[in-house]
Image (cartoon, rainbow, N blue to C red):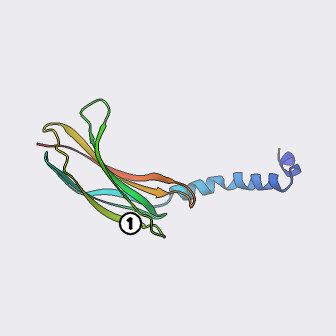
Amino acid sequence: MFQNIFKGGWLGILLLLLVATMPTIVQAATKVETSAAIVSLTPSCSSISITGTGSYQQGIGKVAFVLADVSESYPVIVDRKEFSYNSKPLPKQVTESWSSTLALTPGTPYRVVFQVWGKLAPYSGLSLVAYDGKNFTCT
């Protein structure tokens, strides 16, 4: 097998080196420290206030709060807010707060999720790297 690769010249050797180092690259990417936490949540039927903190050592491109009605067999997003970061370098840790004044239905179960989005590679788009969620029912 390797004889055919080496007959391909430098391209074959480059391919062999790339395949040999791929597990190391994947392991390094999965060891990056990430976190997301909802640190305060004040739900009521007239409004909801939430604060989330997140970290990602490669740099955070955006964070998002998502509020969903989970009373049906599938969640329905009822409100959301995103905070984007365009500074260079991207922040490694952020804390954001959001208040939704959307009127919620008493007795309905809801879920709020705080998401951290980061760049997995220098020229890639954003990927979800961490999240935290809390369930509540407004009364």
Q: Is residue 36 left or right of residue 2?
A: left
As drawn, the residue found furthest toward the left would be: 139
Q: Where residue 107 sits: x, y (%)?
A: 14, 37
Q: Residue at x 87, y 47 (%)?
A: 3
Q: Assess disc 1: are there few (<14), some (14-19) or many (≥20) residues with their C-alpha within 10 Å of its C-alpha.
A: some
Q: Where residue 22 sits: x, y (%)?
A: 65, 53
Q: Where residue 43 sits: x, y (%)?
A: 17, 50
Q: Quadrant of the rendered structure where residue 52 is?
A: bottom left
Q: Quadrant of the rendered structure where residue 1 is?
A: top right
What residue is disc 1 on?
93
Q: Residue at x 31, y 57 (%)?
A: 37
At label 1, the amino acid type is Gln
Q: Quadrant of the rendered structure where residue 74 is?
A: top left
Q: Is residue 122 left or right of residue 49?
A: right
Q: Is residue 96 left or right of residue 128?
A: left
As drawn, the residue found furthest toward the top would be: 73
Along the line of sight, which residue is nearer the eye, 45 or 93? 45
> Which element type, helix, strand or loop, lies under badge 1?
strand
Q: Residue at x 24, y 33 (%)?
A: 71
Along the line of sight, which residue is nearer the eye, 66 or 84? 84
